[in-house]
Every structure is written in structure tokens, then in C-alpha cells.
Image (cartoon, rainbow, N blue to C red):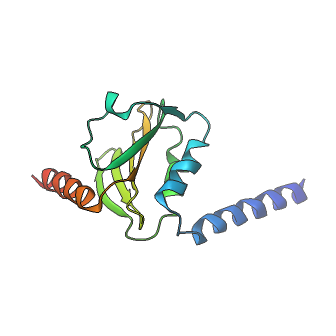
Amino acid sequence: MKRIISLTVSLLGCIIISFAENNNRSVEDIFNFASQIEGFQELENVKDYYDFPNGLGKAKMIIHGNAEPREEVLALLAQLPDGSMVYDDTDERGRFDRFFLDEANNLLYVHIGINGNDSVLILFKGGKRKNIDKFINRITSEQQD
């Protein structure tokens, strides 16, 4: 029994180190990994749920019916390079809306609620940097008002 516990602890340690050391993932990698988490499903038309401006790129969305995968998603986001997060709106209860941008100008929107609130990730690919910057500047300005 001690051997099984020891092996389990060692395996968990290796997994954590692997996650911690790899902080060069793209937002597309993170989206793809998150889409494999049990309970996430892809929804077809982002415009039916969110009113993002045109020009951010072609959007793909995955959604989970509650905030259950919060820790898994946070562990994935920790693999993004420093400086990837371009917007953060976290409330006093820990719910957040964040945007992450990679070198290829792919933009990732992440909403994580708490308890029964949905978890949502939207990947925007092929957007123009000018349009992305304009959008991020606008929502940052609105947040500060």
C-alpha cells in the first residue's frame, strides 16, 4: 500500500512539474486541451450567445454547464507565456472574464463562474491585430469607468 501511495504521489509531482515548466503554450493549444475536459461541448454560433465585434477572427466556443472545471482550466492557463493575459475582470467572489493573446494574434476569451455558473472558452483565430487592440482598449476603458 505504501508503494502505491508513493507511486501516486510521484506521478502527481511529475504532472505538476510538467505543467509548471511548460509555459509556452499558444492560446489555441489551451483551447484544444480545455475542449478535452469532460463536460465541455462545442457550440456552433458564438453570435447567438455573445456580441463580440467583427474583426477579432473566426470564433470557436466551448461551454461547460457549471464552474466544475475551474481548477483544470486555471492549470491550463498557467501554461501560457507571461504577458499573454491582456484583460482581466475578476469580481470579489472569484468569477472572471479574461482575454489572452498569443504571438499569432489568436485571442482566447475565458469566463469562469463559481458553483453553478457556466465555464466558457472562445478562441478567435485570424483576427487583425489592429481590431484586437481596439477591442481590448475599449473594454479596458469601460472597466475603469
Q: Position of residue 3 (x, y in %)?
A: 89, 59
Residue 56 vs residue 135, the one in the foreground:
56
Q: Position of residue 23 (x, y in %)?
A: 53, 69
- Frontmost residue, 112 versus 34: 34
Report how many numbered discs are placed on residues in the image: 0
Would residue 74 be found to the left or right of residue 126 on screen? Answer: right
Residue at (54% x, 56% y) in the render = 29
Which image quadrant for residue 7? bottom right
Left or right for 6, reference 66 = right
x and y percent of residue 28 in the render? 50, 54
Q: Is residue 70 above or below residue 86?
A: above
Classify residue 107 as left or right of residue 2: left
* Residue positioned most to the left: 145
For image coordinates 61% across by 43% down, the residue present is 36
Q: Residue at x 87, y 55 (%)?
A: 4
Residue 63 vertical position relative to residue 71 in the rendered view, above or below: above
Q: Picture quarter containing residue 39? A: top right
Q: In this rendered view, identify the residue nearer to me: 57 or 15.
A: 57
Return the x and y of residue 87 as percentages of the image width and height. Answer: 29, 57
- Residue at position x 44%, y 34% from top? 115
